[in-house]
Image (cartoon, rainbow, N blue to C red):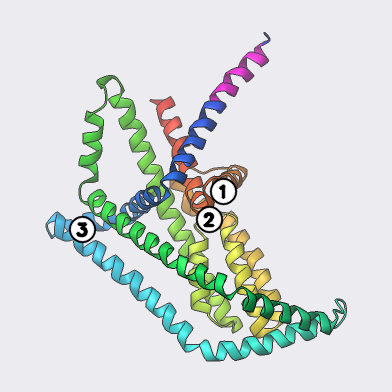
Amino acid sequence: MTPFLRTAAAYAWRLLIVGVLVYSLFAVLGRFHEIGVAVFLGLVVTALLRPVADVVTRGLPRPVAVALTLLGSVALVLGVLALVGEAVAGERTTLVREFRVGIGRIEDWLERPPFRLDPGALAGLQGKVGEFLSSHRSMLISTALSGAGHVVAVLTTLALALFCAVFFIHSGDRQWAWFQEQLPRSVRDRVGVGGRAAWRTFTGYTHGIVMVAAVNAVLVGVALWLLGVPLAVPLALLEFLAAFVPLIGSPIALAVAAVVALASQGPLVAALVIALIVVMGQIEGHVLHPLVMSWAVRLHPLVVAISVIAGSIAAGIVGAVVAVPLVSVIWSVRTALRES
């Protein structure tokens, strides 16, 4: 066997093992995704709030500091959601009127060159949509009722995530030390090295992606407000949440903003929002990610894209969010163990 084939075979079986492990992990998460999501969210909350709790602990007992940190964070999140709800409620009447006018404007635009759509086709489409809603009313109602079960599952997952975060923030280091003591002595040191590398990378990625999402949301919110696009605050919040899916999340959120701008302000403002998608992509890819992610593992954009797509195929939206930090942690652990 030639040296090239020997080297290729050596890397091939390693890649197969890594692929099987990653697939098995996502398969387990798919079967118990509520628990996996809750633990993941608990780790995210811990990465964000443990430094705050450590600072508060300097003046208060640890349990009190953890409780105050978590309660303050929950109050902040609820306050932001209340602000968004108030903004939507305040603009609801105006928004409905603008959308009606905007839909008529879009229909007129489609009937003129270069599209020249038949007005009867648009009216027929509206009629077919109405007929579909009328004929499938029972199915839609049952779907809405089944959505209540999903709401309960989401609330349960969030409660479990908060429960995990309480113990991770309060005594996560002691829990990790107990876990290491259960392992054979021969592997404790290497597990400790890998665990420290994994947590360092995970916290760095979490802090970085939150900062990137916050900067994106502020820039998008200010830009939409200056352009006069309604619901600028909710759309900025959507941009913040979408930024947690690298590469594709932000363009999708801005595409929703472009649709809102098209219906409310017309094609010119919508074109400016589309231009904003390009500008934000350049800022995020060439400024924010290299600058903010410098303390975490920096992955090649191709690796990020493949990870996001593979995660979304394996576990949907949850997989798309978890894929990049998971790959970053695996790579950092591999690097730390190789250097130790």
Residue at image location 67% in from the left, 80% down from the top: 130
Instruction: Reply yes or no: does residue 251 show up in magenta.
Output: no
Q: Quick one: which residue is furthest to the top in this view?
A: 1
| Amino acid tagged 1 | Val
Q: CA distance from mark 3 to mark 1?
A: 33 Å
Instruction: Reply yes or no: does residue 4 show up in magenta.
Output: yes
Q: State the image coordinates of residue 85 (x, y, percent, origin top left).
A: 43, 80
Question: For the residues carrying marks 3 and 1, which lies nearer the camera in this image?
Answer: 1
- The residue to which callout 3 is attached is 66
Q: Earlier in the sequence, mark 2 or mark 1?
A: 2
Dot 3: few (<14), some (14–19), or many (≥20) neighbours within 10 Å? many
Q: State the image coordinates of residue 284 (x, y, percent, origin top left).
A: 56, 58
Whether residue 241 is visible here, answered yes or no, is yes
Quarter of the image with the C terminus is: top left
Residue 2 lies left or right of residue 49; in this view the side is right
Residue at image location 11% in from the left, 57% down from the top: 61
| Amino acid tagged 2 | Val
- The residue to which callout 1 is attached is 308
Q: Earlier in the sequence, mark 3 or mark 1?
A: 3
100 vs 292, nearest the viewer: 100
Secondary structure beneath label 3? helix
Q: Earlier in the sequence, mark 3 or mark 2?
A: 3
Quarter of the image with the N terminus is: top right
Dot 1: few (<14), some (14–19), or many (≥20) neighbours within 10 Å? many
Q: State the image coordinates of residue 197 (x, y, percent, origin top left).
A: 37, 37
Disc 2 to disc 1: CB gap under 8 Å: yes
Specify the segment rendered in magenta: 3-14
- The residue to which callout 2 is attached is 245
Q: CA distance from mark 3 to mark 2?
A: 29 Å
Secondary structure beneath label 1? helix
